[in-house]
Image (tube, rainbow, N blue to C red):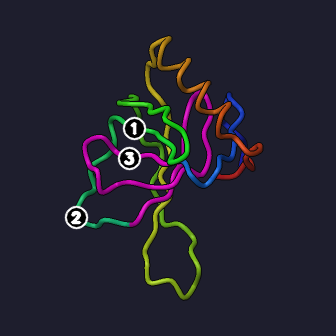
């Protein structure tokens, strides 16, 4: 598969999370993040197929809170979990839309504080 992303993606520490601003039950741990997009893993919630329109992004170890970042879903698919797990997990990814200069600066700071390495090129 050809890599379509224009920005490098970074793996992030385990203490980083995203939540759908319209559906708080879609809360999950970040997998990777870039200046243009994000992916996170969340527990499947079959009664809400609504796509994200804004995300809140935060860390349990730092006070920086990224509020209401415009977001467009690119994929939402089942995620691999331990075979004995009873939890159904999904991997959700997409791109940020029309970030203001202030939001882009906050995102850059968040990435700088929480990145732990470059992410692999696969979805």
Secondary structure under tag 2 reads loop
Secondary structure under tag 3 reads strand
Please report the residue visible at 75 percent of the width from the left and 50 percent of the height from the top.
Answer: 120
The magenta segment is 17-43
Residue 61 is situated, as x and y percent measured from the top left of the image, at: 55, 45
Please report the residue visible at 58 percent of the width from the left and 31 percent of the height from the top.
Answer: 110
Residue 21 is situated, as x and y percent measured from the top left of the image, at: 30, 40
State whether residue 93 is above or below residue 7: below
Q: Is residue 19 left or right of residue 40?
A: left
Q: Name the residue under label 3.
A: 19
The answer to if 51 sits in the magenta stretch is no
Q: Which of marks 2 and 3 is nearer the N terminus?
A: 3
The answer to if 27 sits in the magenta stretch is yes
| Near-viewer residue (71 or 24) | 24
Q: Is there CB contact under 8 Å for labels 1 and 3?
A: yes
Between label 1 and label 2, give the one nearer the viewer.
1
How far separated are the C-alphas under marks 2 and 3?
17 Å
Q: Residues within 10 Å of mark 3 (few under 14, many from 20)?
A: many
Q: Mark 2 points at which residue?
A: 47
Please report the residue visible at 48 percent of the width from the left and 66 percent of the height from the top.
Answer: 78
SS majority, magenta: strand
Q: How crowded is mark 1: few (under 14 residues within 10 Å), some or many (20 or more)?
A: some
Please report the residue visible at 25 percent of the width from the left and 43 percent of the height from the top.
Answer: 22
Q: Earlier in the sequence, mark 1 or mark 2?
A: 2
Q: Name the residue under label 1.
A: 56
For this orientation, the residue located farthest to the top is: 101
Q: Residues within 10 Å of mark 2 (few under 14, many from 20)?
A: few
């Amino acid at each position: 598969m050809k890599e379509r992303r224009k920005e490098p993606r970074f793996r992030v520490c385990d203490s980083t999370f995203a939540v759908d601003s319209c559906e708080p039950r879609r809360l999950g741990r970040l997998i990777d993040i870039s200046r243009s997009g994000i992916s996170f893993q969340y527990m499947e919630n079959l009664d809400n197929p609504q796509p994200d329109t804004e995300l809140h992004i935060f860390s349990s170890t730092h006070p920086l809170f990224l509020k209401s970042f415009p977001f467009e879903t690119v994929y939402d698919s089942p995620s691999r979990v331990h075979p004995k797990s009873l939890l159904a997990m999904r991997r959700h990814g997409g791109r940020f839309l029309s970030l203001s200069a202030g939001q882009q600066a906050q995102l850059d700071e968040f990435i700088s504080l929480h990145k732990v390495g470059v992410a692999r090129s696969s979805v």
